[in-house]
Image (spheres, helix red, strand yellow):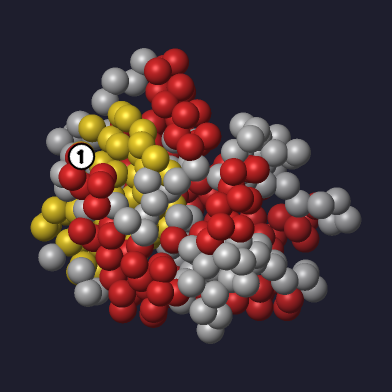
Amino acid sequence: MPTETGRSLAEIEAYWREAASAETDADGLRPTARDPFLQEAVETAIERHLSGGDRLLDVGCGDGASTLRFAGRVREAVGIDYIDTFVSRASAASAQRGIGNVRFRQASVLDLSELRRAEGVFDVAVSIRCLINLPEVAQQAKGIAEIAASVRSGGCYLASEGWEEGMRGLNRLREAAGLPAIKTVSYNLLLPRAVFEAEAKQHFEIDGYHSLGFYLFMSRVVQPLVVAPEAPRHDHRINQVAVQLSRILNRSEFRDCDYAGVYVLRRR
């Protein structure tokens, strides 16, 4: 199991500062959510666990698009990111859309003590591909502990990170179909689910898990085979159909190729 990315925290931060310099990348996609339909599936799963009286913390909120969506389901939302450009962009989007129950702050998941002093604890915390941008397992464990300290007893932590076993399983299917393996980018350190669960259980009970394996199978295996020799695209119609079907399918046979599913954790 890899225990570090090979990049330092400063190098990863520099990558995201560069990525934040433009709202979209060369493919016209958001750098923090390059697969819009996967993002839709994750956010839909998370919304099932939000209620109107909640105060929500979105950890590693990036450009704030998810936070703004969740704000429509809760009493109050706070989005945090350690990249100031993302925080400024998210704040501007909130003001432009007139969303008054959300605000954004600059903070690192490795130390949320100042945030807690300013905001108190929350009913719900969310992280979407945040912890995987920490270059060491020990830092990921620290991030989980900091999130736990920011959630009230009985509150909820909803986590969609990057699960190592799911990526391995997906690549086994791709290789069996004659497709090349998906390589994890150098600024990400995927979490083994057993390691994540062990760390999470120090603070939380595991209430459930929303599998997104079907969507990943359709978008990462079926679509490349259908469109070949053209390159697959995150915004392809097959992906759109797959995310629609994933709302009604939760087939266990796709669990082994699920690297993006959502944990539902209850704070002790």
Q: Is residue 30 above or below residue 163?
A: above
Location of residue 47 (image quadrant): top left
Q: Which residue is mark 1?
A: 118
Q: Is residue 56 visible?
A: yes
The residue located at (56%, 52%) in the rendering is 13
Q: Is residue 143 above or below residue 34?
A: below
**Residue 43 in the image: x percent, y percent?**
41, 45
**Residue 133 in the image: x percent, y percent?**
51, 59
**Residue 156 in the image: x percent, y percent?**
22, 54
Mark 1 is on which residue type?
Answer: Ala
Q: Is residue 256 visible?
A: no
Q: Given the current orientation, which residue lies at the most extreme right position?
A: 229
Q: Callout 1 environment at 10 Å: few (<14), some (14 to 19), or many (20+)?
A: few
The residue located at (27%, 65%) in the rendering is 145
Q: Nearer the viewer, residue 73 or 91?
A: 91
The residue located at (25%, 47%) in the rendering is 114
The residue located at (77%, 60%) in the rendering is 225
